[in-house]
Each structure stands twice: as C-alpha cells, then as structure tokens.
C-alpha cells in the first residue's frame, strides 16, 4: 500500500478554501494596488451589466456590498445609478498571484 499516496489524497479532500468575507471601502483600498483600483473604478463606472436597462450601466454603480470570495476574487453588489436595479460584478483578481498572495496576507492580518 502506498501510504504517501493516500495521505496526499486525504489532504486534498480536507483542504478548505478560505471563507468569503465582507470588505469595507477602507479594507478594499488597502487590498488593491493602483492598477487594480483604476480597473475597479473603470468597470464600475460603465462596464457592469444591468438587467433592467438591458445593457451596461450608463451612469455607474452605487456599491452596497463588497466581498472577498473563497477564490480571492472580488464580488461587488450594488445598484444601477439610472434605474436603481440590483447589479453584481465579479472581479477575478484571485487569478493573479500578486493579488492572491496579498489577499491571503490580508486575511491573516484581520483574523
Ligand atoms: Zn439600470
């Protein structure tokens, strides 16, 4: 029997993703570098889909919730500034190693 193999398998199965946590604006500002902030603001200004408007938000989004997801992506919820309809957008920052590492350090710092 390959003990090493079964150990690895077991380890993988029990390995947990970090929980989704809510962020406030201050925490978000710490987490994002300048490029990411610029991208974040540009997307929320005009690149979020609004179902009621059947297109991109024309006047941007009023952000009501920000979450750091279990994949270290950002999930943002808010309201379309034109129709007040609910909108949401995921920023897949967790795919970038630099952000992922920053997010893991941030989780440690606030826990
Ligand atoms: Zn709308």
Image (spheres, rainbow, N blue to C red):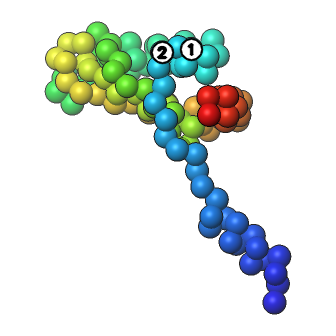
- On residue 61, the disc is none
Q: Residue furthest front?
A: 111
- The residue that mark 1 highlights is 29
**Which quarter of the rendered image does ligand 1 occupy?**
top left
Quarter of the rendering occupied by the N terminus = bottom right
The picture places residue 15, in percent across and down from the top left corner, at: 64, 59
Quarter of the rendering occupied by the C terminus = top right
- The residue that mark 2 highlights is 25
Look at the numbered discs 1 and 2 and tell me whether their residues touch, using CB distance below 8 Å. Answer: yes
Q: In this view, does 71 lie above or below 49?
A: below
Q: Decide if residue 17 is on the left or right side of residue 21.
A: right
Other-residue count near label 2 (Cα within 10 Å), few / some / many at <14 / 14–19 / ≥20 = few
Helix, strand or loop at mark 2: helix
Other-residue count near label 1 (Cα within 10 Å), few / some / many at <14 / 14–19 / ≥20 = few
Q: Decide if residue 82 is on the left or right side of residue 31.
A: left
Helix, strand or loop at mark 1: helix
Q: Decide if residue 80 is on the left or right side of residue 20.
A: left
């Amino acid at each position: 029997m390959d003990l090493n193999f079964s150990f690895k398998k077991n380890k993988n199965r029990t390995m947990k993703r970090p929980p989704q946590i809510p962020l406030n604006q201050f925490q978000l500002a710490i987490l994002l570098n300048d490029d990411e902030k610029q991208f974040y603001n540009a997307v929320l200004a005009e690149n979020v889909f609004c179902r009621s408007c059947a297109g991109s938000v024309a006047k941007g989004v009023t952000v009501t919730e920000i979450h750091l997801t279990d994949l270290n992506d950002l999930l943002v919820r808010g309201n379309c500034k034109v129709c007040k309809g609910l909108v949401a957008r995921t920023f897949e920052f967790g795919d970038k190693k630099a952000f992922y590492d920053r997010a893991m350090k941030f989780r440690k710092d606030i826990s």
